[in-house]
Amino acid sequence: MQRWFWSILVLMSPSLAVAQQAERPAPTVIVSLQDAIAQAMRNSPSYRQTANDANPAGWQVKNAYANFLPSLDVSSSLGYTGEGSSQFGGTLFNQGATMESGYRVSVGWQFSGATLAGPGQQKSNRRAVDADIKNATSFLRNDITTQYLAVLQAEAQTLVAQQQVTRNEDFRALADARYQVGQTTVLDVRQAEVTKGQSEVALLRARQTEREAKLEFFRRMGIAPPAAIDQIALTDSFPVVEPTFVLADLLELSRNENPQLGALRAREDAASWNVRATKSNYLPSLNFTATWSGFTQEFQSVDGLIGNATQRAVGTAENCRFQNGILERLTSPHPAANGGIIGDCNGFAGLDATGLALSPEQRASIVNRNSVFPFSFTSQPFRASLSISLPIFNNFSRELQVSQAAVAQDDAELAVRARELALRAEVEGKLLAVQTEFEAIGVQRANQEAAREQMRLASDRFRLGSGSALEVSDAQIAISRAEGDLVNAIYTYHQAIAALEFAVGRPLR
């Protein structure tokens, strides 16, 4: 439609094309409607906030299925304890510095009614999120399309204002020429100059409106203008054709395609699954756990260990010698029956020949047994447990949750029904608006033709000296208003179609 309207204006005034080329720079960036929508889907902050919900919704479904599988936890620890004294049971213990480490492997599995309902509930939630994203996409498409049309409308109004400046300049030149030959008064010249000045102000304001419309257009896209605002051109055209939409077909399409209605239906399904999940709280739950663990403890100094071992070994050697003495007395009449006597009590107790210190082998064994940090674990006993829980009474909290879920489901059903009723009224109303605006275009075109004829007659009368400058000024105001009203009627028609497409939920052209 933009190209059609430009050609109409050029035919109306050949000088307009020259003026426009002189004042409007050649575009360095062109933007189509589809490019704009694609850019907005990638960059619009409000749209991206909704689109980002898709990934978590997908993971919620995977998490619901994963709840059927056991969980696995693995942990490890490292520690240090300084030397010092501690009291336990009234006894004072001295302990050297130690290094500790440990591990723990735990397997857990839980199963309940909520586990069974989880996948269906989360899949319905994901469908609801997808429907919300589709609804946001439709809203974004309508928003960008509407503003795209607003920019084209502002550009067309700038052309109308530029044409009016050209007309007024021609009128001022004619008035001045007639004044120079004495065929009119200076009053007519001043009237022509005032009229031209007013049209120049209108042109400035039209250009400002156009720039603001472009700035708002890129803001809605979520990006900064890629070039100077006057060097950006929109390329799509929108022909004016008589609407042939059928109300019954549009209503059927809207029931199937309207994304907002689809989102509400998805929410209704999610609410239904939420009721099932809430009722599952009456079912028993099963809980199983199994644990493997181990630890190490290494003393930083083995002197204490060796000292304690030496004391025990000395006591063992003394006891050995004491037992040998008893056996020798019992077998003294019969020396051959001396079985059980240990010949080397020091060696038996792990002492060296002096009987005062551990043997090198025993010392090395103690050092080796102490060298366990960090991975020579001592395993602890395996533990496993299985429990079944059946809730009996929990202060009516389950009943409250079921009641709230049922009310939410009922509200979701009512929201769907309300939207269906509202959608029917919207579609029918938008269709009537399209038909009305198309008829308005025909009326405005007739008004434009009448204003052109008025302008031609007023100009001829003034040129022949039988009319006044005021008549020409009034005719110029009338034709400028008629052309502007025609532009508004054309783009209001296109915006009405965009609104109808938004209500239906899909493009109609």
Image (cartoon, rainbow, N blue to C red):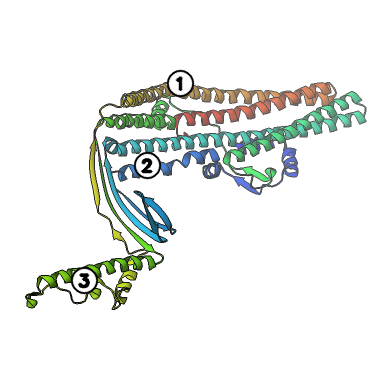
Which residue was labeled with disc 1? 425
* Circle number at residue 234: none
Q: Quadrant of residue 163?
A: top right
Q: Nearer the viewer, mark 3 or mark 1?
A: 3
Residue 195, given in percent of the width and then of the height, sits at 81, 27
* Circle number at residue 60: 2
Horizontal arrangement in the rendering, residue 126 relative to residue 204 (left or right): left
Q: Quadrant of residue 409?
A: top left
Q: What is the three-letter code of the residue carrying label 2? A: Gln
Comes first in the chain, label 2 or label 1: 2
Q: What is the three-letter code of the residue carrying label 1? A: Ala
User: Of residues 28 and 486, which is closer to you in this image?
Assistant: 28
For the residues labelled 2 and 1, the Cα–Cα distance comes to 37 Å
Evaluate whether residue 409 shows in this view. Answer: yes
Q: Quadrant of residue 234?
A: top right
Comes first in the chain, label 3 or label 1: 3
Q: Secondary structure at mark 3?
A: helix
Q: What is the three-letter code of the residue carrying label 3? A: Arg
For the residues labelled 2 and 3, the Cα–Cα distance comes to 75 Å
Horizontal arrangement in the rendering, residue 325 relative to residue 7 (left or right): left
Residue 388, given in percent of the width and then of the height, sits at 23, 38
**Which of the image's four quarters has the N terminus?**
top right
Evaluate whether residue 167 shows in this view. Answer: no
Residue 349, given in percent of the width and then of the height, sits at 25, 71
Residue 153, given in percent of the width and then of the height, sits at 63, 33
Q: Nearer the viewer, mark 2 or mark 1?
A: 2
Which residue was labeled with disc 3? 321
For the residues labelled 3 and 1, the Cα–Cα distance comes to 111 Å
Given contact means CB atoms under 8 Å apart, are the residues at marks 3 and 1 in contact?
no
Looking at the picture, does residue 369 appear above or below residue 217?
Answer: below
